[in-house]
Image: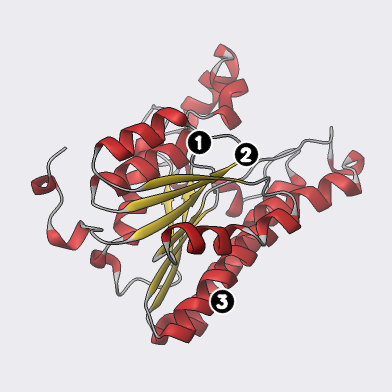
């Protein structure tokens, strides 16, 4: 992809982006489009996507994988210092990593699953944001935070209590930090994806009846693809969104508008 496809307002030249959960799905798509727009990439996940790292390096960008289990607080606290030591401090943070556990109804949801959900889907993003923000504020530098929520951050869901509560909390964190930091040049925004073809939704789109029930409610009559989220993430990381603060962009094929 040539630089001409990305006008100046959508370029990320000279920027370093940390993307959690970049080894697959939405995270991979975001890492790729950022690299195409000129950014270097720090990929953070439990397993390395060797092909992604190769592709990004072939574009002439720096790319390094950092292994971490982001459900473990002690491992989370080491991420930004490790990135800073190896590649420099990031300019962009994408909190994409997340997952859910089901409990066969809220009454059966175990407290250990509650703790795991809130750590991975809420506390981990908070910790990573704070580690980046301390540097940005001390250095007087701008920064961009993009939190990946879910349309469940706008509703209740079924049998997703830990995940849903954490995503609602991450939406609140997005707005609160924007209120606090927007005047200091730090943009904090979020994307709430609808039903996208990823490992997290594989059980639905692989089941013809469940997939059809979902598509009946989606005006576009299509499943989303990771690239559909990546375009919005590029906008929120680029200069084009410098006056965008505390916003939650719903990218769901019209699901929530139904």
Vertical arrangement, residue 73 with respect to residue 21, above or below: below
Location of mark 3 (residue): 176
SS of the residue under disc 1:
loop
Vertical arrangement, residue 29 with respect to residue 197, above or below: below
Kindly indicate whether the residue at mark 2 contacts the one at mark 1 (C-beta within 8 angstroms).
yes
SS of the residue under disc 2:
loop
| Residue 59 shown left or right of residue 7 in the figure | right
For this rendering, which residue is in front, 6 or 81?
81
Label 2 neighbour load within 10 Å: few <14, some 14-19, many 20+: some
x then y, percent, for residue 247:
43, 66
For this rendering, which residue is in front, 79 or 166?
79
Q: Please name the colour scheme applied to the rendered image.
A: secondary structure
Which label lies toward us, 3 or 1?
1
Kindly indicate whether the residue at mark 3 contacts the one at mark 2 (C-beta within 8 angstroms).
no
x then y, percent, for residue 59:
24, 39
Label 1 neighbour load within 10 Å: few <14, some 14-19, many 20+: many
Location of mark 2 (residue): 46
Location of mark 1 (residue): 23
SS of the residue under disc 3:
helix
**Residue at the (63%, 66%) spot, across then down:** 126
Quarter of the image containing the C terminus?
top left
């Amino acid at each position: 992809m040539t630089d001409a496809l990305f006008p100046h307002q959508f370029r990320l030249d000279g920027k370093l982006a940390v993307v959690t959960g970049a080894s697959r799905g939405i995270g991979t798509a975001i890492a790729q489009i950022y690299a195409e727009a000129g950014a270097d990439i720090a990929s953070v996940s439990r397993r390395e996507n060797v092909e992604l790292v190769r592709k990004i390096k072939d574009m002439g960008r720096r790319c390094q994988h950092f292994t971490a289990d982001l459900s473990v607080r002690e491992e989370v606290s080491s991420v930004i210092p490790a990135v800073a030591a190896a590649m420099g401090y990031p300019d962009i943070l994408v909190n994409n990593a997340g997952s859910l556990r089901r409990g066969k109804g809220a009454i059966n949801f175990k407290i250990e699953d509650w703790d795991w959900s809130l750590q991975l889907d809420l506390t981990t993003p908070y910790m990573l944001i704070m580690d980046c923000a301390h540097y940005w504020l001390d250095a007087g530098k701008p920064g961009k935070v993009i939190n990946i929520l879910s349309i469940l951050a706008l509703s209740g869901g079924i049998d997703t209590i830990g995940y849903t509560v954490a995503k609602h909390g991450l939406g609140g964190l997005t707005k609160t930090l924007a209120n606090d930091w927007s005047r200091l040049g730090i943009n904090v925004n979020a994307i709430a994806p609808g039903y996208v073809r990823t490992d997290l939704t594989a059980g639905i789109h692989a089941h013809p009846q469940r997939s059809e029930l979902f598509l009946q409610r989606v005006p576009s009559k299509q499943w989303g693809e990771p690239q559909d989220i990546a375009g919005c993430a590029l906008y929120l990381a680029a200069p084009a969104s410098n006056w965008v603060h505390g916003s939650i962009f719903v990218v769901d094929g019209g699901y929530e508008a139904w």
